Amino acid sequence: MNLIIEILTYHLTILFALIMAIFLGFELISKVPTVLHTPLMSGANAISGVVIIGAIILVRSSGSEDYVSLALGSLAILLGTINVVGGHAVTNRMLQMFRKK
Amino acid sequence: MTALINLVYLISVSLFIVGLQRLSSPKTASSGNLIAALGMGLGVLIALFAPMESGDDNYLIIIGALVFGGGIGLVVAGKVLMTKMPEMVSLFNGLGGACALLISIAELLNFHDSGTIELAPYLTTLLALLIGSIAFTGSLVAYGKLSGNIKDSWKLPRANMINMVLLLTLIAASVYQLQVLDTMDLVYIIMILSLIYGITFVLNVGGADMPVIISILNALTGVSAALAGIIYDNMIMLMGGILVGSSGAILTLLMCRAMNRSLLNVLAGGFGGTSSGAVQVGDQMVKEVNIMDASIMLRYSTNVVIVPGYGMAVAQAQKICKELEDLLEEVEVNVRYAIHPVAGRMPGHMNVLLAEADVDYSKLLDLEDANKFLKDTDVTIVVGANDVVNPSALDDPGSPIYGMPILEILKGKHVIVLKRGMSSGYSGIENPLFFHEKTSMLFGDAKKSLNSLLDELKTIV
């Protein structure tokens, strides 16, 4: 119970945003036609790479001697960037094929 | 400065939303992807240059990792074949999960180093770790299965029980850790258990159920990103993560509905193999058709439907389908493609392959439209599809796929099935379609068969 109260006090604004985002997400995605499901998925996949923002903040806020954080954070940035850049690039390739007509 | 940063923040989130909105039509989709990418770029820029309270910035490391990762991403994305899309998406998805996993571990370590632990952010971080780990190994196993490195026959005995025990242990361990919060030891155990759970939960899922699994894994990575957004109080991460989570969740539901199965049933992996009630068809005869008869049938049809399946992807036969379509359209035969939602190995897999071959997307019919069109169809060509055209789904209550909505190709006049041999489909379920009086088989590699059909047709049009 205490935990729930603490969560509500700690993250209230972001929880509001969370709820709005869930409804918005369902609203937006349910409009995507079947034809575009694969690009939707790979595009969404690229967007899920936003975690690199967290990784960047992590590395920036670490001291230059904090090797554990630096190692974990830089590996996270590396993998996340492959996801983001590769995901958007491959989605772009697919969508170019749909645009030709 | 803070005002400017907040403004860019807002713009970045809006770009994500507009980008996804534009994905709802093939004409605007391409710009939608670029707009979302721009939003991502802005988000990264803020993360790089917003003033920080503490830390040494470590720009050299960050820029290095960004450039190196971006380079790898571009090269891989430029090279991959369209038929390999499901593998590619799984692999990228796994990397996103790994990213969430790594930062969660680092943040949990920081919590323990700092001495004071607040419960709420700790719980969020622990959840991000758990879900990120499951998405990571789950996606890698999905990648392995799709690329053929992990055989579909490699199954765990009593997988359901193992999964249940793992899941309960994970929950119990997490609750306990939140009570004691003394060391990181239990956190590592939770991580390892989550990694194992990711493997066991994907390993037993059949190949034909891959569209569902890829969608779930996609949703999980989105959720772990959103949780990480809560950790850093970062609206871009939260919004991006939730949008991905919703997209994955919706696709999961659509795929399950297209197979008329519950999510639990898919996860239990009970499809096929145990098909106790399946029709015994061992002695029945199939009818073969030769290239010449088949091409004459096609030439004098009014409406022809092509049903693509995973076999088309394997044989890389999409371009030759398009050539066949062009030739038939020249002599005023209408050609349409009937696409089942779960054909292939990921949602929309067939649409992408046909788009690659320049097929106009107005010729691609979804399940409902296809079943209307099939009534007036003279010849249906099945290219490497199996379960999605299995009539047992309609009339055999004993069949494991009974009740699944299928493409009802027997409503048309004739069916030609292109197939390598008489093995049953990926799910191992017998298909009475092959023995039906309306059906003729054309054995051989789909691409070769279509090529010979095409050559033969050229001589008579």
Image: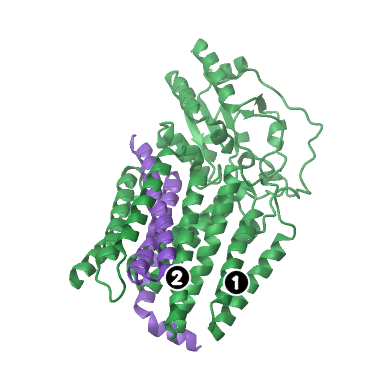
Is residue B363 at all visible to an observer of this figure?
no
Q: Colour of chain B?
A: green
For image coordinates 64% across by 25% down, the residue present is B444
Q: Which mark is residue A92?
A: none
Question: Going by the picture, which residue comes out furthest to the right?
Answer: B283
Q: Using the image, determine if residue B158 lies above or below residue B426.
A: below
Three-letter amino acid code of the residue under disc 2 = Ala
- The residue singled out by tag 2 in the image is B106
Chain containing the residue with disc 1: B
Chain drawn purple in the picture: A
Its colouring scheme is by chain
From the viewer's side, name the closer residue of B367 and B268. B268
From the viewer's side, name the closer residue of A82 and B365. A82
The kind of secondary structure element at disc 2 is helix
Q: Using the image, determine if residue B92 lies above or below residue B281.
A: below
Q: Quadrant of the N terminus of chain B?
A: bottom left
B324 displayed left or right of B414:
left
**Residue B297 drawn at (x, y percent):** 58, 19
**Residue A64 drawn at (x, y percent):** 35, 69
For image coordinates 69% across by 29% down, the residue present is B421
From the viewer's side, name the closer residue of B264 and B233. B233
- Pick whichever of labels 1 and 2 is earlier in the sequence: 2
Three-letter amino acid code of the residue under disc 1 = Ile
User: Splitting the image into 4 quarters, where does residue B283 fall?
Assistant: top right
Do the numbered discs 1 and 2 sit on residues whose CB atoms are within 8 Å?
A: no
